[in-house]
Each structure stands twice: as structure tokens, then as C-alpha cells.
Amino acid sequence: MTSNARRAVVVGSGPNGLAAAITLAQAGLQVEVFEAESQPGGGARTMELTLPGFHHDFGSAVHPMAAGSPFFSTLPLHDHGLEWIHSPAPLAHPLDDGSAVMLERDLNDASRALGEDGRAWEQLMRPIVEHWPGFASDILRPVFKVPHHPLLLAKFGLQALPSANFLARRLFRNARTKALFAGVAAHSFLAMDEPLSASFGIVLGATAHAVGWPVPRGGSQSITNALCSYLGRLGGVVKTDSRVGDLSSMGEFKVALCDVTPKQLLQIAGPRFTPAYQRLLQHYRYGPGIFKVDYALSANTLSGLTATFLMDRHSTCSRVSKHRSNVLLLDFATVCLLEECSKRPISKRWTRTWSAETSVGGPWTCCSFYCGRPGGSTRRAHQMFSFVRPQHRRAAESMACAATTQRNWH
């Protein structure tokens, strides 16, 4: 077999493109990945988006589906530098009354914390949690394969088909549990009354108990770096600053895979497709757009801000109305960070207040600040503190996420 007969090209170095490249390399092909940007990773990049020294995740900062990926779990990514950091509780959902509902990692603990809705939550999640590897493989591969758990998949299909609103009203009594499920289901970017929006709430809710909602140490770039490193061990090459305008300019190859959008694919390889498929690509309708805003904060910016640490791990409702005008709801890992920065202990059982000006003591980074209009609980800003300045790097290794509410929006 000639060299070109074994050559494979992949356009785009996002996680999907790199996964495809690794699969091809494992099959014995000579793989080249072409990336238009100077840094590989696509949405899984960590970049200085605001100021020098402040690192932000370009896309998602929390990766339950990466941690629970059937394919990624077969790769020795830990040997190539990928390490997951888990918060004791995967997530919390802030409510309009100033309280928050927390989802515990352990399913039994979550069931007890959710009170009257605990049993319904457990019955919805436990079958998936207990069979996560096979279930994940079933829902993430082509539907033409025989499923590992056909009965579980059939039950999931019936529950996942309706809207998130419908399923929440049908299963849960308490508004807090309904809000929690809606917040998880909102990751679908579908309206809560649209069909199939419930599926995201079920799957991501189950991952919270099955694999957690971890962040990669060093940011999302660590995922990309580990994939690139393993691909390199297999003989593959990633070429950055290499924009592909036409597949015909790539020379001879056995196979080409494109990790791009439909209209980009039409531009790159349109003449290779049938007229009917070209029309499908041309008329592809994209989903709703989203955005996030990254902030670089300093101690002066936080001067006078009083943070309320909600550390009673057995409480499902922690009031912060005393400081409603400017409040940070911080999780356990965040308090660990502030303890490290201030070198002063913070009670891990009782709620207390702390001056951010004295506890932070220096510039640090606020990452993935999702903004929306004030008012609804599902439109509150969600703040994830991912990195700090180099002098606080070790403390940031314990960082997870936090939710913030503010009265004044600018």
C-alpha cells in the first residue's frame, strides 16, 4: 500500500475532529489534522480572552459528557496530562427568592435533599446511573445498532420525548425541584415547552450522579492537549494555522473527515456531493445563537463586596436575602480557594460573611459568566471561577463553580 493510500486528512481540531483522527490512526492510517486557528481545540480551548495572564475557557468549562464519554474512557488521556476536578456537589440552581437548590453527587443524598420529590428524582435517574456505560454508548452512537439495554432505552425514549415543562409538572411537586430540572434541561438551548427538551434534563441530570460535572485541571485546553498528545503517540500530526479552502488542494488521500459546520462543508467539498445533498447543506437552518461574557476581575473591582458562603452541606435552602443587592453563592471548592488566598480558615458548616477585598487579596479571573436579563431564575448569571493569577495557581486546582446574583445589571 502506497503512502497516499494510507493517508487520512481531518479538517478541524475540535474534540470531534481529534476523536476521529485518533480512530483513524488506531486503524493504521497516517493522519494529518488541519486547523485554521493558531491553537487547536475549537470550542475546547483555554485562552487569554480579556487581559494577559487571565485564562478563560473559550467554550464550555464543565464537561460531564467528556468525563462520561464511552470513547474517551477507552483512551489513556490521564497518561497525557488530563485530570478531572470534582466539586462535592455538581451543581446548584439559584432561585428568585434568594435561595438555591443543590444537586448532590450521591443519588441517595440527592433523593433525601429533594424531600417530597426525592423518590421521583431517584426513579427517573437511577436506571440510567446504574447502567451509564452501556446507556451512554447507546445514545451516542447510530440508532441502527442493537442497543445494550433495549428496555432502558425504550423507557428513556418515552420520558425524553415530551417537553421539559411537561415532564417536570408530571413528576415533581415542589417548584424548587422543577426549577432544578429546568436549569439542567436548558442546556438543550430549546424552549422548555418544546418536544425533546426533557431529554437533556434526564441525561445531564444522570451524569451528575454517574460521572459528576467535573472541570479539567488547567481548563478545557487540557482535554485538547491530551487528545493531541495521544494522537502524536499514534503517529498523527496536528497542523495549526492551516486553513482549508478546498479539499482538492489537500493532495491524494484515502479518507477525509471534516469537523466543520454544514455550510463550511459545502464550501470545502461541495462539488464532491450530489446536487440533492448540496441543497440540504445550503438550506441547513442553524439553531439559536448563544454568547458568554468573560470578565477579568481585580481586588479593587470587588472592593466592599460582601460574599456569603453557603457551606451547610445538608441544607437545601440557604437564605441570602440580607445581602440580596450584591451576592455570590460560592461552593465548597470556591471557599477552599479563598482560604488558600487569605491563609485564614473559613467555617465549612455554618453560613458566614467574608469581605472579598481582604480574602481574595489580589487579581483573579472570573470565567464563563453567562448573562441574561434579570428576573427569572433560569436567566440569572452563572459564574464559574476557573483560574486565578499564577501566584494562586495551586489554590485554583480545587476550583469548581459558583452562581452569582446581582441587583444592578450594566
Image (spheres, helix red, strand yellow):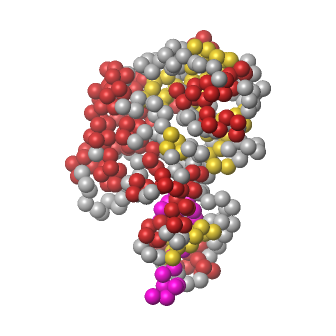
Residue ID at (51%, 79%):
7
Q: Nearer the viewer, residue 404 or 161?
A: 404
Apparent side of residue 330 relative to residue 55 in the rendered image (left or right) = left
Could one spot residue 372 in this view of the protein?
A: no
Q: Is residue 169 above or below residue 274?
A: above
Quadrant holding the C terminus? top right
Q: Residue at x 58, y 25 (%)?
A: 335
Going by the picture, which residue comes out furthest to the bottom?
A: 2
**Among all residues in the image, which is located at the extreme left?**
151
The answer, for residue 233, to whether it is visible in the render is: yes
- Quadrant hosting residue 268: bottom right
Q: Residue furthest top?
A: 322
* Image location (x, y in percent) of residue 369: 63, 36
> Start and end of the magenta stretch?
1-21
Q: Position of residue 279 (x, y in %)?
A: 51, 70
Asked if the magenta segment contains residue 8, the reply would be yes
Residue for point 28% across, 45% down: 131
Rendering coords of residue 54 (x, y %):
71, 42
| Along the viewing direction, whichever of 275 and 342 lies nearer the viewer | 342
